[in-house]
Image: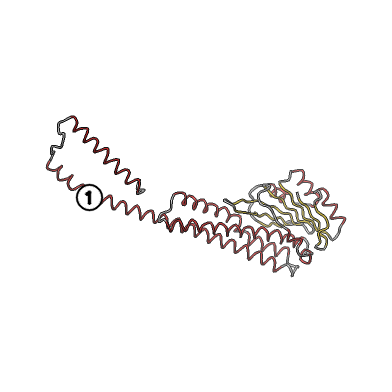
Amino acid sequence: MSSRLYVKGRLVAEGFDAAEAGARLRAEPGAVLWLDLVDPGPDELRALAAEFELHPLAVEDAVTDRERPKLDQYHNHLFLNLYAVAFDDEVRKTEISAFITPRALITVRKPPGEVALQLDRWDADERLAAGGVDFLVYGLLDVVVDGQYATAQRIDESMDGIEDRMIGEGTAPRDVRRRGFALRRTLAGLRRAVAPMPEVVREAGRALAADEHHLRPYYRDVEDHARRAVDLIEHSRNRITELLDDDLAEQSNALNDVTRKLAAWAAIIAIPTAITGYFGQNVPYPGYEKWWGFLISTACIVLTGSGLYAYLKRRNWL
């Protein structure tokens, strides 16, 4: 759990317990509070709900996993749900629920420890931080959207290697195709977390910065970044889909080429087979009616069949 108390944009206290939050706000009439809870228990949330008069439906959404990104308005507070994301070899998501009251921002993270929130920018500019909770919410949205855009960029860059191997090797090896399918699935999951964000940020700007003229450009900037993240994800989805479709077309062309070659050889072999079969020709061969002749013919069948199998396997036709 983290906690911070600001007075006129200046950090005056941090690291105190959630039980002290209400008392500290009452003791400092001009103060604003940020309280960050990591996977809180029911009793802790009930105590905060009673202290800050949080709506039961918002509290229920805060403890329910996999809620969609949204901004809900209640009679005395807003409820915000969004996802912070990061990308290593796979996308890691942390669901964040936030209660936004006139003097407090209470965030609930679930599951814990997935994505760290670096909110040092709250302390960087006291003039902006003097905007109170509106500025705290801007800082939260800015960090989350920047992380989403950075994740979309890293995924797009990781496709460069897949594209190079697909183009350089004709038909892609199986591991490259599997990586491509995994990225497409990753992008689909990321899109569900990112696609609603431009609308969420715009609604937050209307609700929180309507009277804060100096904060409006900041909310518009976050909205613009959110739209860029959505556009980049859509571009990446189209790109990986086109790469996989091109690879499938290349595989079909290679298969058609192999089929054409096999059909040509089958036609060549069919002619003497048909003629000798029509005339019933059974020409004596070395070892005809001898026991060792059977062994020679069997060995020829095994060796030629094995050689043909090895050839087709080397050409990836089998």
Residue 75 in view, yes or no = no
Q: Quadrant of residue 213?
A: bottom right
**Residue reaching furthest right?**
27
Residue 253 is situated, as x and y percent measured from the top left of the image, at: 35, 56
Residue 36 is situated, as x and y percent measured from the top left of the image, at: 74, 52
- Please state, as top left, top right, bottom left or bottom right, where the C terminus lies in the image: top left
Q: Dot 1 surroundings within 10 Å: few (below 14), some, or many (20 or more)? A: few
**Vertical side of 116 occupied by 290: above or below:** above
Could you tell whether 281 is left or right of 173 in the image? left
Q: Quadrant of residue 198?
A: bottom right
Q: Secondary structure at mark 1?
A: helix
Q: Residue at x 14, y 31 (%)?
A: 289
Frontmost residue, 185 versus 310: 310
Q: Residue at x 30, y 51 (%)?
A: 259
Could you tell whether 88 is left or right of 116 in the image? left
Could you tell whether 318 is left or right of 31 in the image? left
Q: How many marks?
A: 1
Q: Residue at x 20, y 47 (%)?
A: 270
**Residue reaching furthest top?**
291
Circle 1 sits on which residue? 267
Q: What amino acid is labelled 1 in the image? A: Ala
- Coloration of the structure image: secondary structure
Residue 43 in view, yes or no = yes
Frontmost residue, 59 versus 297: 297
Q: Quadrant of residue 215?
A: bottom right
Frontmost residue, 70 versus 3: 3
Residue 211 is situated, as x and y percent measured from the top left of the image, at: 75, 68
Residue 140 is situated, as x and y percent measured from the top left of the image, at: 70, 58
